[in-house]
Image (tube, rainbow, N blue to C red):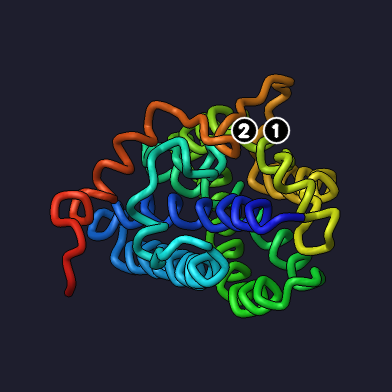
Amino acid sequence: MTNKNLIQYIYGIADNSLILGQRLGELCGHGPSLETDIALTNISLDLFGQVRSYFQYLAEISKDEVTEDDLAFLRKEREYKNVLLVEQPNTDFAYIITRQYFFDVFHFMLLKKLEETKNVNLQAIATKSLKEVAYHKRFSGDWLKRLGDGTDISKEKAQQAVNDLWVFTDELFHLTEDDKAVVEAGHGVDVSLLKEAYYKEVTSLLDEATLQTPETKYFQKGGKNGIHSEHMGYLLAEMQYMQRAYPDMKW
């Protein structure tokens, strides 16, 4: 395992939280109720807090003189390693909740295993983040059950969201070459081993929500290798605007 392998591996974890946090941040003031609006905003803040820990660690081990802000805001689109799932737009509340639940189940499993790696810094971040992510998963899972087993309209919208976002779930379990090197050294998690337990948990909740599990065999991928959907460029344009418009500005 090289230093470059570890850096790219951490990007793969941190960028998921960064991009999903940005998507949730877009919702501030637009929730269906005050309580839900605040909850989604708090989840966004939790994710950004986790990202800061990852990027502070990355800045320490990087050979370049960079800060956590540089890593978050000044990379090009192809340099972000998040999965395609988290960059999907906020189509409606059912999409927001389904996207969140699909990611939360994976995220919780990943952090549990990350606590068992040799990397003490990643262990510490995982331990600190687990309570937050446990709440995220409970929140999104409860809402998905409400939508699926609610009114005819909420059920229809939830099923459509499940159908559309399901094709992005398999990428969560892909390993890049950098991932393989870090896992082999004992500093990372072999996410492919989480796949069976993930789908078992997700399909169980879908059954409870009276929603159908999609039978598609085709899944989309590319985000982990920096190849993103058409939505990513617009997201980054908004997220990076201040830092690119006013380089090196200080608060």
Numbered mark located on residue 213 in the image: 1
Q: Position of residue 245 (x, y in %)?
A: 14, 50
Q: Which residue is mark 2?
A: 166
Q: Position of residue 108 (x, y in %)?
A: 67, 62
- The residue shown at (56%, 41%) is 83
- The residue shown at (54%, 44%) is 81
Towards the viewer: 66 or 189: 66
Q: Position of residue 82 (x, y in %)?
A: 53, 45
- The residue shown at (40%, 38%) is 77
- The residue shown at (66%, 58%) is 3
Q: In the structure shown, which secondary structural element does the residue marked by tag 1 occupy?
A: loop
Q: Would residue 149 appear left or right of 179 to someone viewing this image?
A: left
Confirm whether residue 217 shows in the render: yes
Residue 233, compared with residue 25, is above or below; it is: above
Q: Within 10 Å of the Cα at label 1, are there few (<14), some (14-19), or many (20+) other Cα atoms? A: some
Amino acid at circle 2: Trp
Quadrant where the N terminus sits is bottom right
* Circles 2, 1 touching at the beta carbon (< 8 Å): yes
Give the quarter of the image for residue 105.
Answer: bottom right
Q: Within 10 Å of the Cα at label 2, are there few (<14), some (14-19), or many (20+) other Cα atoms? A: many
